Image (cartoon, rainbow, N blue to C red):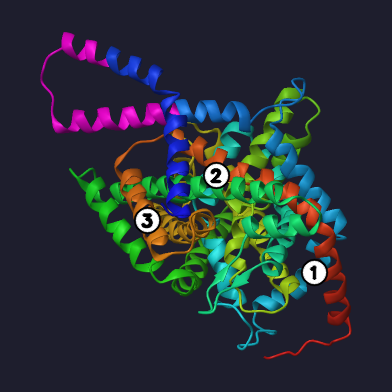
């Protein structure tokens, strides 16, 4: 039996064990359900069966997610109810910002010039351009985190949560620079030109260079890869498919079987793109993301212009809600935690996912691609999320019960001023979800290859599983998948932030050399 087969058996064995540990309470719940059914009328139909299946899957997810949350969202200081992962993300982002001397500010203009293609050499190694790498990474972050995540943060943490989203977005810029630069340094270019890169590779290779034994370095890479695979099936897939299906159902109505049909069509459309790899993904996302971001931002600006008199009051409310002295201590912590969780879920700064896409960029300057990646959190969180928050506040949606929460709140906020916008928003949800899925399929595939090898068989197995999860996400109502997505995606930061801090001196040396050459005008300009 090959080593890859043994790895596959081990991986799925772990999943079965984790699931099996929780089967007893689920079985008891199912036995209880059977008793109720036997005591009721025998009339059952296909809809009831489908509901029962969805509820069973949802219950299983709930048990697993609950047990995982006890460990991954552990609060080390009971008096300060902040999960350990949130502390790691905050401290890590602040460390990178100070350590790299506020590069997020001093390198901002140069990063824009790079993204415009001023330094693009077509002969550099890699698969995609700087702009395609940025849009590929943004396609996995810009979307439901901006449309629904902001509303969730305001609903649960109040308007003050927006400040913390902006702050973690600004600090996260340098965290993303650090991880994407490392991804470029330690990437592997195969003979056919395809690239393998990302945290799993730089953690394994880089930590060994820093003196860590191979088992420790390998463990860092494996832990990240496992969480990344989980994130690709959860937040990068099922949640997106579920929301896209809801958007289509909102446009066409509750037609019988539409979930299965749309899920299958969506899986087919995603399959057409992911078969082509990162080159096809880059070509698609460079068209979808600028278009959808432009439409969404334009509609938001129209609403803000219409409500221009309320914008200053909304800004004051956001700041006052964040630092208000009359706010309870626990409430302040809750606002901070919600803001950070939603910001990280939105821009993924510090979790290492975007580094996988940026590793494929055509350049022989690692720092240059790191600077391009730095723009991601700014566009995603500081610009789009802040605009969404202002729209939600000036429209009064945040304190209107009938507005609902999540994407419903955002839809209500826009429709109050632009009655036709819900249709555009539904299309945006679909396209954002679609672009997120194709980018996360690439992330998960690279993590899968790290564990199971780069053979065609291994890749095909992953893609089939990924497409199957799209259909499952479309037909099932899985409330727990949101919490599962947070767990997987945020937990990627455990090995990534810790490893990134250890490897930061290497990035600092590269940055110092690059900045010296940039200031001395030693780079060739191609425009």
User: Is 341 placed left or right of 8 in the picture?
Assistant: right
Residue situated in front as seen by the camera: 156 or 340: 340
Which mark sits nearer the N-terminus, 2 or 1? 1
Q: In this figure, which residue is indicated by the disc labeled 3? A: 461
What's the residue at 66%, 40% (across, down)? 339
Q: Which mark is residue 149?
A: 2
Give the residues in magenta: 33-62
Decide: marks 2, 1 in contact (CB < 8 A)?
no
Which secondary structure dominates the residues rendered in magenta?
A: helix
Q: Quick check: 505 above or below 86? A: below
Q: CA distance from mark 2 to mark 3?
A: 32 Å
**Pair 2/1: label in front:** 1
Which mark sits nearer the N-terminus, 3 or 1? 1
Residue 319 in picture, x, y percent from top left: 75, 41
Q: Residue furthest top?
A: 39
Which mark sits nearer the N-terminus, 2 or 3? 2
Residue situated in front as seen by the camera: 321 or 354: 354
**Pair 3/1: label in front:** 3
What's the residue at 41%, 61% (across, down)? 459
Q: CA distance from mark 2 to mark 1?
A: 28 Å
Residue 283 in picture, x, y percent from top left: 46, 75
Q: Callout 1 environment at 10 Å: few (<14), some (14 to 19), or many (20+)? A: some
Q: Quick check: 6 above or below 300? A: above
Q: In this figure, which residue is indicated by the disc labeled 1? A: 107
Q: Write down the quadrant of residue 438 in the picture.
A: bottom left
Residue 63 in picture, x, y percent from top left: 45, 25
């Amino acid at each position: 039996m090959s080593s890859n087969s043994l790895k596959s058996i081990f991986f799925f064995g772990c999943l079965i064990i984790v699931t099996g540990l929780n089967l007893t309470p689920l079985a008891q719940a199912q036995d209880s359900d059977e008793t109720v059914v036997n005591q009721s009328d025998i009339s059952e139909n296909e809809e009831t069966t489908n509901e029962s299946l969805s509820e069973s899957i949802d219950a299983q997810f709930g048990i697993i997610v609950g047990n995982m949350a006890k460990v991954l969202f552990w609060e080390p200081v009971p008096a300060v109810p902040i999960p350990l992962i949130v502390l790691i993300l905050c401290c890590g982002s602040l460390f990178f910002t100070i350590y790299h001397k506020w590069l997020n500010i001093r390198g901002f203009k140069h990063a824009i010039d790079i993204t415009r293609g001023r330094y693009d050499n077509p002969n550099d190694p890699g698969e995609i351009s700087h702009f395609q790498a940025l849009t590929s990474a943004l396609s996995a972050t810009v979307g439901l985190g901006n449309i629904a995540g902001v509303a969730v943060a305001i609903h649960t943490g109040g308007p003050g949560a927006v400040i913390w989203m902006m702050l973690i977005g600004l600090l996260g810029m340098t965290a993303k620079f650090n991880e994407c630069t490392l991804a470029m340094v330690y990437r592997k270019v195969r003979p056919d030109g395809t690239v393998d890169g990302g945290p799993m590779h730089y953690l394994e290779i880089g930590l060994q260079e820093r003196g860590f034994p191979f088992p420790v370095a390998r463990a860092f890479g494996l832990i990240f890869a496992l969480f990344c695979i989980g994130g690709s099936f959860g937040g990068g897939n099922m949640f997106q498919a579920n929301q896209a299906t809801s958007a289509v159902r909102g446009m066409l109505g509750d037609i019988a079987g539409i979930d299965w049909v749309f899920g299958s069509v969506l899986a087919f459309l995603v399959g057409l793109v992911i078969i082509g790899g990162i080159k096809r993904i880059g070509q698609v996302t460079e068209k979808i993301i600028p278009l959808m971001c432009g439409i969404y931002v334009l509609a938001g600006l129209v609403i803000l212009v219409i409500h221009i008199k309320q914008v200053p009051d909304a800004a004051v409310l956001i700041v006052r809600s964040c630092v208000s002295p009359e706010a309870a201590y626990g409430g302040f912590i809750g606002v901070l935690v919600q803001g950070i969780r939603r910001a990280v879920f939105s821009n993924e700064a510090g979790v290492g996912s975007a580094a996988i896409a940026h590793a494929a960029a055509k350049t022989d300057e690692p720092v240059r691609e790191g600077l391009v990646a730095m723009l991601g959190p700014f566009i995603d969180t500081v610009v789009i999320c802040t605009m969404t928050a202002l729209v939600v506040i000036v429209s009064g949606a945040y304190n209107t019960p009938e507005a609902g929460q999540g994407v419903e709140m955002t839809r209500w906020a826009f429709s109050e001023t632009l009655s036709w916008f819900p249709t555009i928003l539904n299309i945006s949800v679909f396209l954002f979800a679609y672009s997120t899925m194709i980018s996360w399929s690439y992330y998960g595939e690279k993590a899968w290859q790290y564990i199971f090898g780069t053979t065609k068989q291994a890749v095909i197995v992953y893609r089939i599983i990924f497409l199957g999860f799209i259909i499952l996400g479309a037909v099932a109502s899985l409330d727990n998948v949101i919490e599962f997505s947070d767990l997987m995606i945020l937990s990627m930061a455990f090995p990534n932030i810790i490893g990134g801090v250890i490897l930061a001196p290497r990035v600092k040396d590269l940055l110092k050399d690059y900045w010296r050459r940039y200031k001395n005008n030693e780079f060739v300009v191609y425009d």
